[in-house]
Image: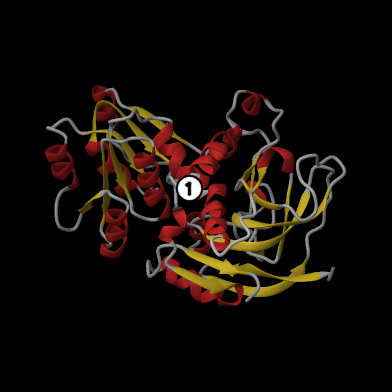
Amino acid sequence: MADAMRAVVLRAPHTVEVAEVPIPRITEPGDILLKVEHTAICGTDLHPYEGRLEVEADIVLGHEFLGTVVAAGEAVSQFAEGDRVVSSCVISCGSCYQCRRHQPGNCAGSRIFGLGLALGDLAGGQAEYVVVPHADLNARRIPELGSAEDTRFAEDILFAGDIMTTGYEAVARSMRPGDTVAVIGAGPVGLCAAMAAHALGAGQVIVVDKVAARLKEAENLGAIAVNADETTPADAVLDLTEWRGADVVVDAVGHESALLSAITLVRAGGTLSIPGVYTEDAITMPFGELYLKGVTVEMGVSHITEYIDEVLALTAARKLTPSSIISHRMGLSDAAEAYRMFADREATKIVLSPEN
């Protein structure tokens, strides 16, 4: 194997470059090394890209990837060379107090790929190779279809490592069959949440956004689209719920304006689920309204490994098809343009191929 590989490196806010960097090496007995087949740009990647999350210079970005095992540590028992694998974007240890209580997103040693030293110093997967620590816990083998359908299925599975499972958890932890689910934000996580709500038996799914193309994607998934530039979302949701409000409201944006809107949509006794990432120290919110309505708030880093097996099973059964939201397939060499397009909302979801 060569000593260097191509990877997407963050040089400064709004500046990424495809550069040659050393191939990562297995350093712990539970590690596996993957040759990356597919990798994607996620909304969370925009936090360091746009400077909202301070990271050290020259980190390798990316936490959504799928690949083939080329080497495994001596303690790995679930994987062997040649296996195709998808990994959770969040790495947990499996043995701390939080992990033992099935809260791996709160792991005392939690690490996230491609987000710098403060979040675990793990090189990202927008590269030709990536190391996955604690692989037996955090990664999953995927089937080889051996047909023309294989590429599409692999792209579906790719998203089990983050956005599909994140969207699924945001709904599954709060929803009952027949519920009305309202999703703020028709970006990738919001669309995956809408898809999951349908798969889990929601009575109706409402998606709120301002971008017409994204709202069209939501309609293609069977959701009721509400354009916040054309109507007041709270009025639309009240009209659709006999003036109760939604049983579950998902803030899939991670911005104060989205959160304030979400609070107006949730019914008394309902649940506000927040998979959107917040990095601010403080925001203004109507706490009294939440208290008087008796709203349950669910939020935090997703517990990917607690839900990924359900997502993989539903994906294999074609109940979840997140590859349908891919708008662009580009080469790794086009990463700078891909990031610009994604940040400017010219793309819904971009998958990068390390082969190009």
Q: Closest to the observer: 54 or 206?
A: 206
Q: In the visual, does 50 lie left or right of 120?
A: left
Pointer 1 local density, CA inside 10 Å: few below 14, some 14–19, many at least 20? many
Q: How many marks are shown on the rendered structure?
A: 1
Could you tell me which residue is drawn at 55 percent across and 52 percent down? 157
269 lies above or below 254: above
Q: Closest to the observer: 119 or 69?
A: 69
Query: Which of the 4 image quarters holds residue 55?
Result: bottom right
163 lies above or below 338: above
Could you tell me which residue is drawn at 27 percent across and 55 percent down? 219
- Residue at far front of view: 147
Could you tell me which residue is drawn at 16 percent across and 34 percent down? 241
User: Does any portion of residue 80 appear in the rendered image?
Assistant: yes
User: Does any portion of residue 134 appear in the rendered image?
Assistant: no
State the residue position of label 1: 164
Could you tell me which residue is drawn at 42 percent across and 67 percent down? 327
Q: Position of residue 116 (x, y in %)?
A: 64, 54
Q: In the visual, does 41 lie left or right of 82?
A: left
Q: Secondary structure at mark 1?
A: helix
Q: In the visual, does 156 lie left or right of 77?
A: left
Q: Position of residue 148 (x, y in %)?
A: 56, 65
Q: Position of residue 216 (x, y in %)?
A: 27, 60
Q: Position of residue 166 (x, y in %)?
A: 48, 43
Residue type at the position of mark 1: Met
Q: Closest to the observer: 292 or 201?
A: 201
Question: Which quadrant holds the N terminus?
Answer: bottom right
135 lies above or below 56: above
- Residue at far right of view: 74
Question: Which quadrant holds the C terminus?
Answer: bottom right
